[in-house]
Each structure stands twice: as structure tokens, then as C-alpha cells.
């Protein structure tokens, strides 16, 4: 089993080394790492070049944003399983990909996902929020639930069958993709009850209340597109509750 990891970068010089090191330190080693760069101008490419021995392919060219970059990477992937690790994120442990590989040994499983912790932007060891997921059940998406996208691993043939990121969604294409695959097409999933990824606080969506609102509108629009009944008010309230609880609960040992 080979796992393809796609990393989209753009002016990521401050964080990309941590991402690269966390991949290199994985105990599971049948990895194809593909980096899609949006023509960075801050030294990112120099760092990537110094790690070429660990990276299967580096593409640097203009793109239409992070979801377009991710689509390019998925299209180039040759692994049996495809996952995404953002350029400011890192695997939580050296065994994160091994856990994915074990889950995906079951031929009946199309995808898997786990838990995620948000960490301080300057300190990967400082946990700020804990995103604990759960096994998928039909109807969860309409109640505000979604797996942590950076922990979401999918068989490559599932992308070929059901499509990649829909670029019509600028802030919620990850939600739309997982809703489409899990809720609409009911691909078979496995939940790994462990923290797989550390995610730095920040991101385009959380930079303003306006972007948060726009993302929720896109989420509602995606549910309508796939004929998944959803109350926008109910979804937003459930999301507020889920996000608030992430600041209270902590994974074991943290």
C-alpha cells in the first residue's frame, strides 16, 4: 500500500520545514509526497529544494487557490490512498500514517479519518483546541458535524469516481467534498479514535467574521446542491456548540 500526501504551499517558509520533517519521521515509509506551490516568493522553494530527496514531485506555478492546488496534487498522485497535509500542519505522532494504513487494510473501507488538535501558531506542542470526531452516521452533516479534513484519507479510485474539490466553493470546498462522499454517495468509512494531525491556528476562513459567515453560506448551498436537508440556523448553532467544546476537552495525555 502506498500513501500519497499532497501539500499545497504558498509563502510557507516559516512552517514548511516542520511539515516536511513530520512526514520524513513517519514509521510508515511507503509515501509519495507531492508539493504544489503557488509560485512562492519568500524562500519556500529553497526549503523544498533542500528536501528534494524526500519529495516525489514539486510543481510551482500559478493556481486558483488552495483547493485548485490540492486538485492538481490529487490528479498527479499514484498512491493507493490519498491524503492532504497543509504546509502549516504536522502529523501528531510518528505513527499517524501507520494508523491510516492499518485502517485501510480492510478492502471494504473507502476512507478513514481521525481526531485533530489545533496548536499555537508558534508552538506545535501547545494544544489550544481538540477536535474529537466520531464514526459517521447518515444525517450527521445536517446537524453540523464534519470530520477534520486534514485527517481525511481516501482511496484514489474514489476521487476518480466521485470527483475532487468543487472550485465553486471558495471557503467550504472541503466540507462539500466530504458531504458529497459520505452523506450523498455513502462511501464506507472508518474512524480512528486518535489524534492524527496538529493544525496551527489561523487560516483564511477564520481571519474574519465575514469569512466565517460566507463559509457557512457555502456549506448551506452545498447541502442544497446535494439535496441534503439542512437548517442554516440549526447548523450554525450546532457548529458554535461543537467549536466551543473544543476549547474545553483535551485528548488523553495532553
Image (cartoon, rainbow, N blue to C red):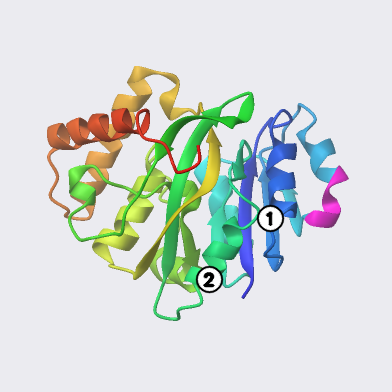
Residue at image point 84% right, 52% down: 52
Q: Return the residue at label 2.
A: 102
Quadrant of res 241:
top left
Q: Residues within 10 Å of mark 2 (few under 14, many from 20)?
A: few
Foreground: disc 2 or disc 1: 2
Q: What element carries label 2?
A: helix
Residue at image point 72% right, 50% down: 59
| Residue 60 visible (yes or no) | no
| Place of residue 169 in the rendered image (x, y in percent of width and height, measured from the top left) | 37, 41
| Magenta segment includes 166 | no
* Distance in Å between CA atoms under marks 2 and 1: 22 Å
Closest to the observer, 46 or 106 = 106
Left or right, 29 with respect to 135, comes to: right
Left or right, 101 with respect to 36, comes to: left
Left or right, 180 with respect to 7, comes to: left
Q: In this view, does 213 lie above or below 181?
A: above
Residue at image point 69% right, 64% down: 31
| Place of residue 12 in the rendered image (x, y in percent of width and height, measured from the top left) | 68, 32
Q: Give the range drawn in magenta.
A: 50-54
Closest to the observer, 169 or 149 = 149
Q: Across the whole image, how many numbered discs are drawn on residues?
A: 2
| Residue 132 visible (yes or no) | yes
Q: Return the residue at label 1.
A: 34
Amino acid at each position: 500500500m502506498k500513501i500519497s500526501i499532497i501539500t499545497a504551499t504558498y509563502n510557507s517558509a516559516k512552517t514548511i520545514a516542520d511539515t516536511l520533517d513530520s512526514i520524513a519521521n513517519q514509521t510508515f515509509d511507503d509515501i509519495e509526497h507531492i508539493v504544489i506551490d503557488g509560485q512562492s516568493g519568500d524562500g519556500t522553494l529553497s526549503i523544498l529544494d533542500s528536501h528534494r530527496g524526500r519529495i516525489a514531485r514539486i510543481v510551482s506555478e500559478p493556481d486558483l487557490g488552495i483547493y485548485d492546488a490540492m486538485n492538481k496534487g490529487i490528479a498527479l498522485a499514484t498512491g493507493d490512498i490519498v491524503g492532504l497535509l497543509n504546509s502549516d500542519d504536522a502529523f501528531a505522532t510518528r505513527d499517524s500514517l501507520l494508523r491510516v494504513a492499518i485502517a485501510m487494510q480492510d478492502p471494504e473501507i473507502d476512507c478513514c479519518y481521525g481526531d485533530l488538535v489545533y496548536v499555537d501558531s508558534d508552538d506545535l506542542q501547545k494544544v489550544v483546541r481538540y477536535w474529537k470526531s466520531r464514526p459517521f452516521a447518515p444525517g450527521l452533516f445536517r446537524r453540523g458535524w464534519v470530520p477534520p479534513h486534514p485527517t481525511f484519507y481516501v482511496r484514489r479510485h474514489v476521487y476518480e469516481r466521485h470527483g475532487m474539490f468543487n472550485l465553486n466553493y471558495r471557503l467550504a470546498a472541503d466540507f462539500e467534498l466530504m458531504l458529497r462522499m459520505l452523506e450523498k454517495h455513502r462511501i464506507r468509512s472508518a474512524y480512528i479514535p486518535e489524534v492524527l494531525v496538529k493544525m496551527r491556528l489561523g487560516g483564511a476562513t477564520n481571519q474574519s467574521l465575514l469569512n466565517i459567515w460566507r463559509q457557512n453560506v457555502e456549506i448551506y448551498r452545498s447541502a442544497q446542491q446535494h439535496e441534503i436537508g439542512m437548517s442554516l440556523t440549526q447548523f450554525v448553532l450546532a457548529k458554535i456548540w461543537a467549536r466551543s467544546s473544543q476549547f474545553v476537552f483535551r485528548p488523553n495525555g495532553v
